[in-house]
Image (cartoon, grey):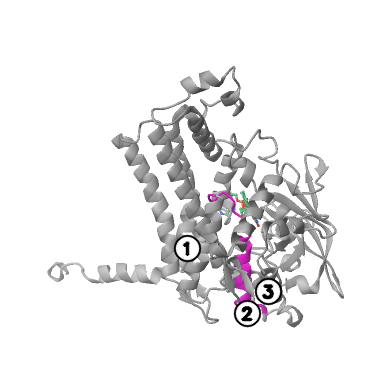
Amino acid sequence: MVRTGNEYLESIRDNRNIYIGGNRVDDVTTHPAFKGITETIANLYDIAADENNNMIYKTEDGTLANKIYMIPKNREDLRDRREAIKTWSDTTYGFVGRSPDHVASFFAGFASSPEVFERGLPKLKDNAANFYKFARDNDLYLSYVIIPPQIDRGKASHEQEEKFLATGVYEEREDGIVIRGSQMLGTGAAVSNYLFVSCITPLRPGDEDYAVSFVVPMDAVGLKLYPRPSYAADKPSIFDYPLSTRFDESDALVVFDDVFIPWEHVFIYKDIDLVRAQFHETPAHKLGNSQAQTRFTSKLKFVIGLAKKITAANGIDKIPAVQEKLGELASLAATAEGLLLASEYECTIDKNGTAVPNPRFLYGAMGLQNELYPKVISIFRELVGGGVLQVPSSFEELVNPETRDDMQRYIRSATVRSEEKVQLFKLAWDVIGSEFGGRHQQYEMFYAGAPFVAKGFSYRNYRYEEAEALAAKCLNGYSIPKDCLV
Ligand SMILES: Cc1cc2nc3c(=O)[nH]c(=O)nc-3n(C[C@H](O)[C@H](O)[C@H](O)COP(=O)(O)OP(=O)(O)OC[C@H]3O[C@@H](n4cnc5c(N)ncnc54)[C@H](O)[C@@H]3O)c2cc1C
């Protein structure tokens, strides 16, 4: 089944516990902090449900599903899946990081590798694959929290000041487990259906109580979300903040106040090695991050398109020095896109017959991201100049008869009218200067872990043998001239 937008909206009208601005949210689909993003996600579901958009595929079980859940079997499948993901990311211009395709990709990776989960408790071994099918067949929106709260990063979870600061098993029961503690950072969680909870940072001996993996419905009793301030709620209009108002997916601290999880929703129980293996011995992390790089590629193209339009509007696009800056932007974007395409072209087929993006190129792109995105934004900032602040406070000044003439006379350029110029520069500000824009810099630097973590993936997956063999070949090709040896 592929859901429509309305079916999605209906599915998130429940008893979830979200606290923002000191109050509990009644209905996320109407609350000003979440209305914009829920409408955006609903639109994504409508796009997927429309057969003309080529986002539906036939599953291994013969059912029809959204391609975001596809387990790719060859390079063509990877391309097909990427194009479906791109259809969504082009719709949000790459500004919704945890749209439903992100965690769906992780679950496709889990389900493709049953042997990994067979290493755990026998009664749990099929749970991840079963839940994958349930999510796929109901076209669910999954979000995740897989990082312990930032309290004392110098200590393991079990060494923190209190036992249940990080999310852990408080009690084991006949029918399931009781979870207590907190986890970061639930992007999109407030508007999703289920939350996947585990730990991707290395766990240490003694951390067994925190070595779990499970899913929980967003309206579970005792599950609480504390989102950061909304960037959408106080904005006057879409025209004034076109990205903040529609794409603020929200990030939240997630608290488990003794939440009961039935065994069927538990995938891994008190197993440190398996918690790591679920991400890295299945294709989950690679499929999830190829989704992320596809989205990132859309975003870079969008920023470059905007830069090109702004330089043309300001009449500077023919200046060689400006073209050099646009060229630098083009090189940066092409590098990210090229690495994504290379990871697909050089994919490998694993022992289960799943096509896995090549990690050298995939993690190569991910490792660059914390420098690449700030650099793109810095060049873009330089190109737009002060024009982003030479705009009226809202679209009202463009329509108010008292101010309209001034707007038309003084805010314009050789090629665009006043209204277009204001529209263009307000959009640019939402990329570089609004709170939403600032959050996006943080997002691109941290969503896949801190920069040193992302570069660590690149280090571990480059395959230095090939590089070292080349260096060795060169070194072995010459030596101190024999007649000089004594
Ligand atoms: C906007 C945003 C959205 C996010 N969404 C999600 C989400 O949906 N789900 C989810 O699970 N997580 C999410 N995250 C959390 C993200 O995964 C974490 O921010 C990330 O794992 C880094 O952890 P941290 O923020 O605690 O940084 P820390 O681990 O505290 O690191 C901060 C800095 O400390 C230094 N440092 C710390 N440890 C070391 C070390 N061992 N070696 C060298 N330097 C070190 C580095 O300079 C590092 O950059 C999101 C984060 C952001 C910013």
Image quarter where the N terminus lies is bottom right
Please tell me in which quadrant of the rendered image residue 142 appears: bottom right
For this view, does 464 lie left or right of residue 486?
Answer: right
Mark 1 or mark 2: which comes first in sequence? 2
What residue appears at the point 39 percent right and 54 percent down from the top-left corner? 334
Residue 104 versus residue 126: which sits nearer the camera? 104
C-alpha gap between disc 2 and disc 3: 12 Å
User: Dots 1 and 2: beta carbons under 8 Å?
Assistant: no
x and y percentages locating residue 47 in the rendered image: 59, 58
Tell me the amino acid under the disc marked 1: Leu
Q: Give the extent of the magenta segment.
A: 93-117
Residue 475 versus residue 433: which sits nearer the camera? 433
Disc tally is: 3
Instruction: Residue at the far left: name it.
Output: 483
For this view, does 468 lie left or right of residue 14?
Answer: left
Mark 2 or mark 3: which comes first in sequence? 2
Tell me the amino acid under the disc marked 3: Lys
Regarding residue 170, the answer to whether it shows in the image is yes
Q: Which mark is residue 62?
A: 2
Mark 1 element type? helix
